[in-house]
Image (tube, grey):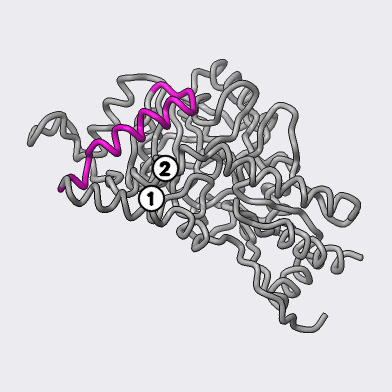
Amino acid sequence: MTKTNKKPIPFLDAAADFHKRKKTWIQALTKIGETGRFILGEQVKTFETKAANFLGANNAITLANGTDALILALRLAGVKEKDEVITTPFSFFASSGAICRLGAKPIFADINPRSFAIAPDKIESRITKKTRAILPVHLYGAPANMTAIAGIARRHRLAVVEDAAQSFGARWKDKYVGAWGDAAAFSFYPTKVLGAYGDGGMLTAADASWASRARRLANHGQDRLFHHTEIGGNSRLDEVQAALLLAKLAGIKDDIAARQNIARLYGEALADISDIVLPERSEEGEHVFGLYTLRAPSGARTRLAEIFEREGIGFGIYYPCPLHLQPALSFLGLKEGSYPEAERAAREVISLPIFPSMTEGQVARVSEVCRAVFS
């Protein structure tokens, strides 16, 4: 296949999103500038209330980024030095990095090869006297099996901290992710389903006392001006990003529906290709397709990536190395073969372009290239 002269298709069209919301964005900047209140103002308060209401969460606290949300959620759950937290070996590094930054140890349980989430039937054998919490990751926009995970946690009196960074608006059964666990972390990084124009994050908490403490910890442990009850940090979402997120939240159901329609079109176009595995569509969960991720044999994935590059089609590989084989976690002493499903996924996954403004013609062209590779 020779190099194409066709217009490139981006993996994510953030510029198109900006132009769609440019007027709203500039109006928000002007309004906030005129108030002179850039931190912990009305935009943040309103967004927290509306986000919590949307998710069915008892409390929502906005933060500077999703990693801070993970660290704070684990800290609220009582995770401390030498504790253990059971989590997935197939995720972005922040899920395990947050555990390590508290001096605790990530204990991995292998994944379900279809959902990419931690496999509930692998969890209980990993529980020890040191286990403090379970941290499932809702990867790519798909929910983990929260019924089973919550049941295991109850039986063993463990906290559940959800990593919902990629999956705002996803549901497992009758509840949104972020409303199942004791606490949950969301990211508003620009590439997310609900993304800001910069960094941002949010923590949801079932218990009001956890939420109150999270607010203190995010503001240097301060419960009133210049009075600090414990050591905290500085993690605040600013008013400008909150205003944008409010505008995006108002249309989030439409954005999710657009992603799901693109996923449907991909599914129809690629369903008969035996060499690839399409994303799982669980009857018990609602996938919001933060990423549209296929599985292909490693050699075929390499060919597909090469042709995408030649054709000017964006793609991503999330993630090429499972966490237990990352150099930063070598102190865990884990080797290749420890978690075979996570390792196989790392060799096979490739994510196709998906964003709410993507056209049917763009989907058709990406699908055509996929079919040409696998024919």
Q: Which of the two discs, 2 and 1, sits closer to the camera? A: 1
Residue 253 circle label: none
Tell me the crowding category of disc 2: few under 14, some 14 to 19, or many 20 or more residues within 10 angstroms, Cα based. Answer: some
Q: Quadrant of the N terminus?
A: bottom right
Q: Quadrant of residue 223?
A: top left
For residue 157, say whether it is visible. yes
Q: Secondary structure at mark 1?
A: helix
Q: Earlier in the sequence, mark 2 or mark 1?
A: 1
* Residue at the disc numbered 1: 24
Q: Residue at x 42, y 40 (%)?
A: 70
In this rendering, position of residue 86 left or right of residue 239: right
Look at the image and say whether residue 344 sits in the magenta stretch.
no
Label 2 with label 1: CB-CB less than 8 Å: yes
Q: Residue at x 27, y 45 (%)?
A: 239
Q: Quadrant of residue 99?
A: top left
* Magenta-colored segment: predominant secondary structure: helix
Give the magenta part as a residue range. Answer: 36-58
Q: Residue at x 60, y 51 (%)?
A: 356
Report the label total.
Answer: 2
Is 103 rendered above or below residue 174?
Answer: below
In this rendering, position of residue 363 left or right of residue 118: right
Q: Position of residue 179 (x, y in %)?
A: 50, 25
The residue lying furthest to the left in this view is 226
Q: Position of residue 127 (x, y in %)?
A: 56, 28
Look at the image and say whether residue 53 sits in the magenta stretch.
yes
Q: Quadrant of the C terminus?
A: bottom right
In this rendering, position of residue 256 left or right of residue 375: left
Q: Residue at x 25, y 36 (%)?
A: 42
* Residue at the disc numbered 2: 247
Q: Position of residue 81 (x, y in %)?
A: 36, 38
Three-letter amino acid code at the position of disc 1: Thr
